[in-house]
């Protein structure tokens, strides 16, 4: 039963099942808990009636709770898809990060919490061979339903440690035709462009200074930069 290191606090959840035969872990999905307190989130994740779970939860003080063994399929992603493939739960590991979220008083993530998230991510990525580009937010895989971990999450700081990507546009990214199909570019990166709010979800992750859901030059530059970085 693979799991992170001995620093984790065991808080088992009954909400999990087997991964389909032959399906390995390809994605790492980051969430916020979106509940008023850490305890309310932990209770829900371990409540069989709730039918939700994650593999880990990281509290604001950096404590890491282990809920579901990594070789089991936790129930964290819901209706979602990435790069044209649904059933994200079967091919991912999910980490919940304690934060009240947009409904209960969204706030910045403390540095000690982000450091613990980074250490946990690196541990999981190394064990499963997950590429930086395959570390995603819940809003990336379910843009019509989800906002987490949101625009205050320190994606640039994680990318500096090799977790996820952060776009660094160059002059090359200014040269594309301004009439290009934004939806097609988002689809090439991995988003389900049939979902509503997909450009807003991209901005929430990669251009949090501009949460309009509308294309603008800098959003396009960052999207092109990511496509160039990944070769997609």
Image (tube, rainbow, N blue to C red):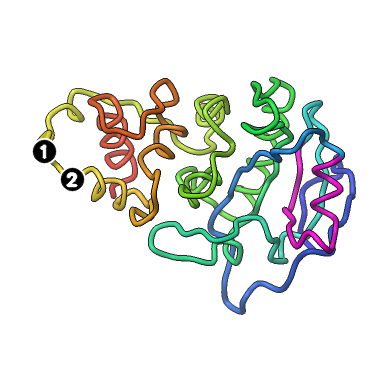
Residue 45 rendering spot, x and y as whole percentages: 79, 52
Q: Is residue 2 left or right of residue 136?
A: right
Q: Is residue 123 left or right of residue 202?
A: right
Picture layout, residue 113 above or below residue 51 = above
Residue 35 rendering spot, x and y as whole percentages: 75, 38
Q: Secondary structure at mark 2?
A: loop
Task: Kindly report the distance in space between the C-alpha atoms of the residues bearing marks 2 and 1.
Answer: 6 Å
- Quadrant containing the N terminus is bottom right
Residue 101 included in the magenta stretch of the image: no
Residue 80 rendering spot, x and y as whole percentages: 51, 58
Q: Nearer the viewer, residue 201 or 157?
A: 201
Residue 74 rendering spot, x and y as whole percentages: 70, 61
Tell me the residue that label 1 is attached to: 179
The image quadrant that residue 120 belongs to is: top right
Residue 52 included in the magenta stretch of the image: yes
The 10 Å Cα crowd at callout 2, few under 14, some 14 to 19, many 20 or more, is few
The image quadrant that residue 79 belongs to is: bottom right
Tell me the residue that label 2 is attached to: 181
Range of the magenta residues? Answer: 40-58
Q: Nearer the viewer, residue 64 or 183?
A: 183
Q: Is residue 203 left or right of residue 103?
A: left
Q: Secondary structure at mark 1?
A: loop
* Residue positioned 73% across, 53% down in the render: 55
């Amino acid at each position: 039963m693979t799991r992170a290191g001995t620093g984790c606090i065991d808080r088992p959840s009954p909400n999990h099942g087997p991964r389909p035969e032959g399906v390995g872990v390809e994605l790492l999905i980051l969430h916020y808990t979106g509940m008023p307190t850490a305890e309310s989130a932990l209770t829900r994740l371990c409540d069989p009636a709730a039918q939700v779970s994650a593999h880990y939860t990281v509290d604001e003080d950096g404590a890491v709770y282990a809920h579901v063994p990594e070789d089991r399929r936790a129930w964290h992603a819901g209706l979602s898809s990435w790069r044209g493939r649904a059933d994200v739960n079967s091919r991912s590991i999910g980490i919940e990060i304690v934060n009240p979220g947009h409904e209960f008083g969204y706030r910045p993530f403390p540095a000690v919490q982000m450091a613990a998230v980074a250490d946990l991510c690196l541990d999981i990525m190394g064990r499963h061979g997950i590429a930086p580009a395959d570390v995603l937010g819940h809003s990336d895989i379910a843009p019509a339903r989800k906002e987490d971990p949101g625009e205050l999450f320190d994606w640039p700081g994680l990318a500096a440690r090799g977790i996820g990507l952060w776009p660094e546009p160059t002059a090359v990214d200014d040269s594309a035709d301004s009439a290009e199909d934004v939806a097609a570019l988002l689809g090439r990166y991995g988003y389900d462009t049939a979902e509503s709010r997909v450009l807003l979800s991209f901005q929430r992750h990669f251009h949090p200074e501009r949460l309009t859901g509308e294309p603008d030059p800098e959003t396009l530059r960052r999207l092109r930069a990511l496509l160039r970085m990944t070769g997609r």
